[in-house]
Amino acid sequence: MHGRIAIAVAEMWKQALGVATTLHAEEFKVLLQDIDRGDVTQVFRASWLADYNDAYSFLQVLQSGFGINLPRYANANTILYWRAPPPKSTPAAGERCSRTRSEC
């Protein structure tokens, strides 16, 4: 399935943007090793599911230095977000606030 998605995306980029791509498939273990070494091409595809039904679980992907932040995304605003104390959770829902911190 990953291969078919990659081919479809490459074709869309070619048609819409005129971007020529070279696809490279490798085992997941090898991909993770390449990512850890920083030996990755400009784009890679991986799949992941949230650990639990909460926006916080998805936001962790953007946390600088966090293990599942595979592309090593970093942004000053998100760094400030993660350094701030967590918002108060609602006892009934047990979920973290999925809005901006000022609304929590």
Image (cartoon, rainbow, N blue to C red):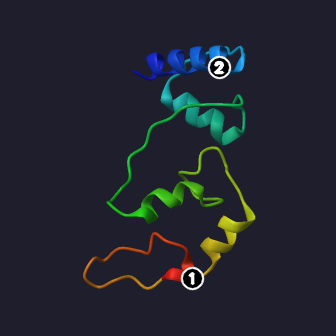
Q: Residue at x 54, y 32 (%)?
A: 45
Marks 1 and 2 in Cβ contact (< 8 Å): no
Kindly report which numbered mark, 1 or 2, lies closer to the viewer in this rendering. 2
Residue 38, percent across and down? Answer: 72, 38
Residue 15, percent across and down? Answer: 63, 14
Q: In which quarter of the view is residue 88 placed? A: bottom left
- In this view of the protein, can residue 86 be seen by the observer? no
User: Which residue bears the numbered disc 1?
Assistant: 102
Q: Is residue 39 left or right of residue 29?
A: right
Residue 66, percent across and down? Answer: 58, 58
Residue 83, percent across and down? Answer: 64, 76
Q: Nearer the viewer, residue 8 or 74?
A: 8
The kind of residue on which mark 1 rests is Ser
Q: Residue at x 74, y 65 (%)?
A: 76
Q: Residue at x 65, y 33 (%)?
A: 34
Q: Residue furthest front?
A: 16
Location of the N terminus (image quadrant) = top left
User: Which residue bears the numbered disc 2?
Assistant: 16
Instruction: Tell me if residue 33 comes above or below residue 6 in the rendering.
Output: below
| Mark 1 vs mark 2, CA separation in Å | 39 Å
Instruction: Tell me if residue 14 comes above or below residue 59 in the rendering.
Output: above
- Check residue 13 in the rendering and tell me which mark sits there, or answer none: none
Work out whether mark 1 precedes mark 2 in sequence or the reverse, and give the earlier one: 2
Classify mark 1: helix, strand or loop.
helix
Q: Is residue 92 left or right of residue 100?
A: left
Few, some or many C-alpha atoms within 10 Å of disc 1 (few <14, some 14-19, many ≥20)?
few
Q: Residue at x 64, y 59 (%)?
A: 65
